[in-house]
Amino acid sequence: MDCIFCKIISGEIPSPHIYEDDQVVVINDINPQAPVHMLVLPKKHVESVAATTDEDQALLGHMMRVAAIMAEKVGIAESGYRLIVNTGRDGAQSVLHLHLHVLGGKQMTEQMA
Ligand code: AMP
């Protein structure tokens, strides 16, 4: 499948896996928007949160939990962080493989959009 995140997960495209378990891989974003900018990628190829089904509920919860664990690990749990899931065209999703952005290490603005 011609999916950049699938290729990163499989190792075909090199990108250090800063965390990995049976369900997800976490990488650093190649174009960071904050001092900490990680991406939580499900190993299962799902195009977006809109393409998930009831079967994916545990996976979605696991992605959030891994985000919290990684935030703790890199030292931004106390200062805080922002989790983002861009979805579809108006959501400005550019890679069509579900991913959770974890952004922190600076004061975010109150602006949501
Ligand atoms: P989105 O706009 O929500 O689809 O986010 C896609 C993210 O993937 C962007 O923040 C990109 O910088 C990031 N990205 C694209 N290619 C790579 C790559 N090869 N390694 C790491 N991050 C990437």
Image: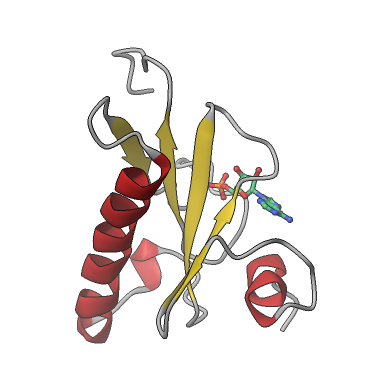
Residue 2: image location, x then y, percent: 75, 77
Horizontally, is 38 left or right of 66 in the view? right
Residue 51: image location, x then y, percent: 39, 72
Look at the image and tell me in which quarter the N terminus lies.
bottom right
Residue 37: image location, x then y, percent: 52, 39
Residue 35: image location, x then y, percent: 54, 27
Look at the image and tell me in which quarter the C terminus lies.
top left
Q: Residue at x 45, y 42 (%)?
A: 91
Reply above or below: 59 against 34.
below
Reply above or below: 74 against 64.
above
Horizontally, is 23 left or right of 38 in the view? left
The colour scheme is: secondary structure
Reply above or below: 16 against 77.
below
Task: Give whichever of 111, 12 is nearer the camera.
Answer: 12
Q: Residue at x 54, y 48 (%)?
A: 93
Reply above or below: 110 against 63.
above
Q: Please identify the quarter of the rendering in which residue 58 is found.
A: bottom left
How many badges with numbers are in the image?
0
Q: Residue at x 54, y 66 (%)?
A: 97
Task: Give whichever of 113, 17 is nearer the camera.
Answer: 17
